[in-house]
Image (spheres, rainbow, N blue to C red):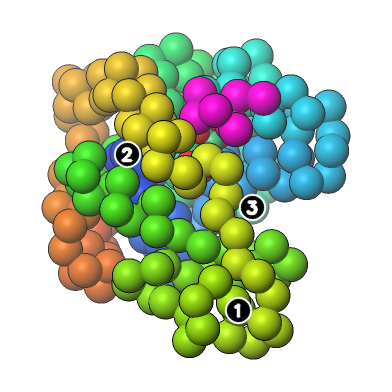
Amino acid sequence: MAELNLILLGPPGAGKGTQANRLTEDFGLPHIATGDILRAAVAAQTALGQEAKRYMDVGELVPDSVISGVILERVAEDDARDGFVLDGFPRTVDQANSLGSEIEKLGRRLTAALLIDVPDDVVVKRISGRRMNPTTGRIYHVDFDPPKQADRDDEDGSELVQRDDDKEETVRKRLVVYHQQTEPLIGYYEQLGLLRRFDGTASPSEVHAHIRATISTLKLEEEL
Ligand code: AMP
């Protein structure tokens, strides 16, 4: 089978995680989510987590020296042999260059960079309304998926919390970082002929249908 080495691009809150989960189901590829890897390291209080937390809490990017090695090793693991869905990496041109050389070293190439585009005001509304059950990790949204009783989990009644990096001020900071450091990757992958754009304001199912159709075409082209 042709490999499917996919990158998801787009601002925080674009729905990259949701789409990555669906692509994982569709194509049996591992979902490599940098944010999740870092949050797990923070929770486990590893050296990586302790270093990363300082940056994550204020919406800044963790330094390349902290993150790049972890992700490049992950991409080379056995379960990513037939491909992967990278979500949250690369986020800078330097990271894109390191990924490019690592992939080349492995004798592989990227299949596509999927951009899920969403305007800033939609991102702020989506993220700053998120509330989480700190014990189970279940996520609600004050407008789009509210709990039955305000700020209480429907199942165990625990008090819901807002993640530090979901606070409006931090979301705005994450957007500034996205525009400055990550957006240049759109031109970068466009020049390489790898960019595919999707309207992230559509429903998750519509975005998924569009992405799946695009990938099916790419797969056919690879197999020809
Ligand atoms: P995410 O869940 O992908 O929005 O990531 C949450 C936070 O983790 C970001 O705001 C950054 O602080 C950090 N992070 C995730 N991916 C990267 C990356 N590729 N490079 C640097 N920092 C990252």
Which amino acid type is marked by label 2? Pro
Query: 84 or 158: which is nearer to us?
Result: 158
Query: 151 or 190: which is nearer to us?
Result: 151
Is 14 above or below relative to 192? Answer: below
SS for dot 1: loop
Q: Return the x and y of residue 113 as percentages of the image width and height.
A: 30, 38
Q: Return the x and y of residue 118 as percentages of the image width and height.
A: 20, 46
Q: Earlier in the sequence, mark 2 or mark 1?
A: 2
Q: Is ligand 1 less than 8 Å from the beta carbon at label 3?
A: no
Is 96 above or below relative to 154? Answer: above
Which amino acid type is marked by label 1? Asp
The residue lying at 51 percent from left, 23 percent from top is 60
Viewer-side label of 3, 1: 1
Disc 2 marks which residue? 11
Can residue 76 be found in the magenta stretch?
no
Viewer-side label of 3, 2: 2
Q: Earlier in the sequence, mark 3 or mark 1?
A: 3
Crowding at mark 2 (Cα within 10 Å: few <14, some 14-19, many 20+): many
Q: Does residue 198 appear anywhere in the picture? A: yes
Please provide the residue range marked out in magenta. 54-60
SS for dot 3: helix
Disc 3 marks which residue? 79
Which amino acid type is marked by label 3? Asp
The residue lying at 22 percent from left, 40 percent from top is 120
In the figure, is residue 218 to the left or right of 76?
A: left
The residue lying at 35 percent from left, 33 percent from top is 172
In the figure, is residue 40 to the left or right of 44?
A: left
The CA span between labels 3 and 2 is 27 Å
Disc 1 marks which residue? 153
